[in-house]
Amino acid sequence: MKFELYPNIKFDEFIENCEVLRTQYTELLTPFFNVKAIRCWKKMIYSLNFAYWKRDKIWEYLNLDIELEELIEMKNK
């Protein structure tokens, strides 16, 4: 399954598709770390129209620093 981010995505929509995005992102980490692609993803995430702290949490989620449950909790806030 493939999912594409677009600049006007809603936070709820992101949460619904975040597992697919995480899978796509983690493919860049192995077998070789793709620095250019990682920077592109980071720029894409931080260009989303969310509160800055939400973008931080999304970035943490993609980098395996937090789990899905924490993002879901944020969705309810």
Image: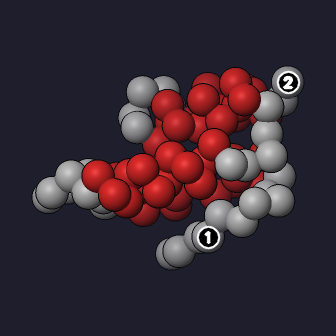
Q: Specify whether 4 is left or right of 62.
A: right
Q: Specify the quadrant of the image occupied by residue 68.
A: top right
Q: Is residue 76 shown to the viewer in this render?
A: yes
Residue lying at 50% horizontally and 46% vertically, measured from the top left: 42
Q: Quadrant of the C terminus?
A: top right
Residue where numbered disc 2 is placed: 77
- Furthest residue toward bottom: 1
- Furthest residue toward left: 31
Depth order, front residue of 36/57: 36
Residue lying at 61% horizontally and 70% vertically, measured from the top left: 4
Q: Is residue 46 above or below residue 19?
A: above
Q: Is residue 22 shown to the viewer in this render?
A: no
Which of marks 1 and 2 precedes in the sequence?
A: 1
For the residue marked with disc 2, what is the amino acid? Lys
Residue lying at 40% horizontally and 37% vertically, measured from the top left: 63
Residue where numbered disc 1 is placed: 4
Residue 57 locus on image (x, y percent): 60, 29
Q: Specify the quadrant of the image occupied by residue 3.
A: bottom right
Please rate how many residues cluster around mark 2, counting C-alpha atoms within 10 Å: few if below 14, some from 14 to 19, many from 20.
few
Residue 36 locus on image (x, y percent): 34, 58
Residue 60 locus on image (x, y percent): 49, 31
- Which mark is drawn over residue 43? none
Please rate how many residues cluster around mark 1, counting C-alpha atoms within 10 Å: few if below 14, some from 14 to 19, many from 20.
few
Name the front one of labels 2 and 1.
Answer: 1
- Callout 2: helix, strand or loop? loop
Depth order, front residue of 72/57: 57
Q: Is residue 31 above or below residue 47?
A: below
Mark 2 vs mark 1, CA separation in Å: 25 Å
Residue lying at 72% horizontally and 49% vertically, measured from the top left: 48
Q: Specify whether 51 is left or right of 22.
A: right
For the residue marked with disc 1, what is the amino acid? Glu
